[in-house]
Image (cartoon, coloured by chain):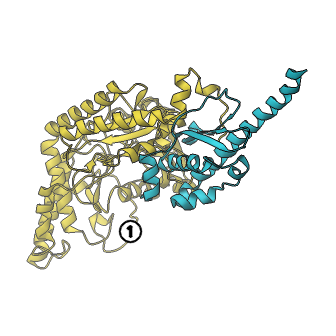
Chain colours: A yellow, B cyan
């Protein structure tokens, strides 16, 4: 057994790569200048580091360095992209198209805009969690100013057909934003080939520090304009004021550079480990279901429902493994994951789901240990489950009149 | 969310997991909760008809650690109590014993419901038995 605990929740956050930390360190101490100071060497040094980071980030998705706007993270990037476009283009139209399984940073931003008079279409997803370009085509009206569809889902790992959607948006002359937080460094992205106008990313999902992110804002064909959401010194082409956190930006730049260079091998490796985990668990345990798309999914993500076992109860049994559950037993609402619900996964199986997120630092030994532990615990909890017992007795659970509480 | 030591202890070493014969007249079965809510408890008691004392109690639970611990604790408390005494078990006592946080209070409520449902089932069975007996004699 490897040393405890095992971190397998890389869709939530990732450990900072030591190479990233090493690159950041001098910018806390000797290279502490303000990147906006034009009058001395301290400022020039900081500015040079920031410009290098812009290039490293832009190179990940074939953008130009001047198209990168630094933010505090993807939540801010999503807010800036959507609210910034809404405010800037409101004379042109008041309609936004997004989809049901977006991150709350997109959904709640859209909900706020609805209260301010905007119309938002939340497209449903299919059973794999995908939205299709045809749905977007049907939703676009002459009032549509923005389409916001994520590149890959954080819970179920499903990759969206963003190239088809981006192409359609170009055709219709509508701006296209994608929340690419989960996709950056995991799957190939290209803002030109995919017709992306705005792209959100964050450092801490790609082995960088928490508290820094970026928004790609297209400069030409078309030149995207945004109403700033934070006023001040006019940094970042006036789109996002605030002194740049140079060490964090160096961290984001280095993390992106490593991700770009190492993605082919790394994604192949995490995919292989993910498949070992998935087939290991699902081969040993009957009545387990993979949530999300079977093939078009992030290489490291496996979201599995274990029938007759509640997710939070299972997490307690595998407490030495850090994972997430779609069960919301801890929340006051008792409602399970809205993402799994949108796929049409029944509430019972949503409560039984566990998200495994394999990343750069996971090992094969860890995967083997997790397969053993999960198999053992699910079997133990099924022996303790009244639902499992009823099914063993041949009872169809749907015929029982449950008292919802 | 951190769990109390008592919840962990019951979760890791649950007491009285299992099933009693539902057809036995001395056995009362309660099945409460719903799979779509993420909690289902089955709680059973076996009562000595002569003394009215609960001689055995078993449970099976689909739910989080706190739900498993609440039902495990309930079976422990039920054994040796009379049916009337068992009806006095309150969810607040379970909350206190297991140091459940507010978001987990519903687990204790479900355990109390399960106790009440098992007793009700037992009592209904007794009424049927009593109703049948004179007929059998006659």
Residue A77: percent from left, percent from top: 35, 56
Say which element carries label 1: loop
Chain to which mark 1 belongs:
A
Horizontal side of A191 relative to A48 (left or right) equals: right
- The single residue placed furthest to the right in the displayed view is B138
Residue A73 placement (x, y as % from top left) = 32, 59
Q: Is residue A15 left or right of residue A261?
A: right
- In the rendered image, which quarter is residue B51 located in? top right
Residue A70: x and y in percent read: 27, 61
Question: Which residue position is annotated with label 1?
Answer: A230
Q: Is residue B123 left or right of residue A389?
A: right
Tell which of B138 and B41 is nearer to you. B138
Residue pictured at 28% horizontal, 45% vertical: A8
Any part of residue B78 in sight: yes
Callout 1: few (<14), some (14-19), or many (20+) C-alpha neighbours within 10 Å? few
Rendered-image quadrant of the N terminus of chain A: top left
Q: Quadrant of the C terminus of chain A?
A: top right
Instruction: Looking at the picture, tell me which residue is in the foreground, A197 or A284.
Output: A284
Instruction: Tally the marks.
Output: 1
């Amino acid at each position: 057994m490897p040393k405890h605990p095992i971190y397998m929740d890389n869709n939530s956050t990732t450990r900072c790569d030591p190479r990233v930390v090493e690159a950041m360190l001098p910018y806390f101490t000797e290279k502490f200048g303000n990147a906006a100071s034009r009058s001395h060497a301290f400022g020039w040094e900081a500015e040079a580091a920031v410009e290098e980071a812009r290039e490293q980030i832009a190179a990940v998705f074939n953008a130009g360095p001047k198209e990168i706007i630094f933010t505090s993270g993807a939540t801010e990037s999503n807010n800036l992209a959507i609210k910034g476009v809404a405010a800037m283009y409101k004379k042109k139209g008041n309609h936004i198209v997004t989809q049901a399984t977006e991150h709350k940073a997109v959904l709640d931003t859209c909900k706020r805009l609805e209260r301010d008079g905007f119309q938002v279409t939340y497209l449903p997803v299919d059973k794999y969690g995908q939205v299709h370009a045809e749905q977007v085509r049907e939703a676009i009206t002459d009032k549509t100013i923005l389409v916001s569809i994520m590149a890959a889902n954080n819970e179920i790992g499903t990759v969206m057909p963003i190239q088809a959607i981006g192409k359609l948006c170009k055709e219709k002359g509508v701006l296209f934003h994608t929340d690419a937080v989960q996709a950056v460094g995991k799957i190939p992205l290209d803002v030109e080939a995919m017709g992306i106008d705005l792209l959100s990313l964050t450092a801490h999902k790609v082995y960088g520090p928490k508290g820094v992110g970026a928004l790609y804002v297209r400069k030409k064909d078309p030149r995207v304009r945004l109403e700033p959401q934070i006023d001040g010194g006019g940094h970042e082409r006036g789109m996002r004021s605030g002194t740049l956190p140079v060490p964090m930006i160096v961290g984001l730049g280095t993390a992106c550079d490593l991700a770009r260079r190492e993605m082919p091998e790394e994604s192949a490796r995490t995919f292989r480990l993910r498949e070992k985990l998935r087939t290991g668990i699902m081969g040993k345990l009957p009545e387990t279901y993979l949530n999300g798309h079977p093939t078009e999914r992030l290489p490291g993500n496996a979201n599995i429902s274990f029938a007759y076992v509640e997710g939070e109860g299972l997490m307690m049994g595998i407490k030495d493994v850090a994972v997430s559950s779609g069960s919301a037993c801890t929340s006051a609402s008792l409602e399970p994951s809205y993402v799994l619900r949108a796929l049409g996964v029944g509430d019972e199986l949503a409560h039984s789901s566990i998200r495994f997120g394999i990343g750069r630092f996971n090992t094969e030994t860890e995967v083997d240990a997790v397969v053993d532990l999960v198999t053992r615990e699910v079997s133990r909890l099924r022996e303790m489950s009244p639902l499992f017992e009823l099914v063993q007795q041949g009872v169809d659970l749907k015929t029982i009149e449950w008292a919802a509480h | 969310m951190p769990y109390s030591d008592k919840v962990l202890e019951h979760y890791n070493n649950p007491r009285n997991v299992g099933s009693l014969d539902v057809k036995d007249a001395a056995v009362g079965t309660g099945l409460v909760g719903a799979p779509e809510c993420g909690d289902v408890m089955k709680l059973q008691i076996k009562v000595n008809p002569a003394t009215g004392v609960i001689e055995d109690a078993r449970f099976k639970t689909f739910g989080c650690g706190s739900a498993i611990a609440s039902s495990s604790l309930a079976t422990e408390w039920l054994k040796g109590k009379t049916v009337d005494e068992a009806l006095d078990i309150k969810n607040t006592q379970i909350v206190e014993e297991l140091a459940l946080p507010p978001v987990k209070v519903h687990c204790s409520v479900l355990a109390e419901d399960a106790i009440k449902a098992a007793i009700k089932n037992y009592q209904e069975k007794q009424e049927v038995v009593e109703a049948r007996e004179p007929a059998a004699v006659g």
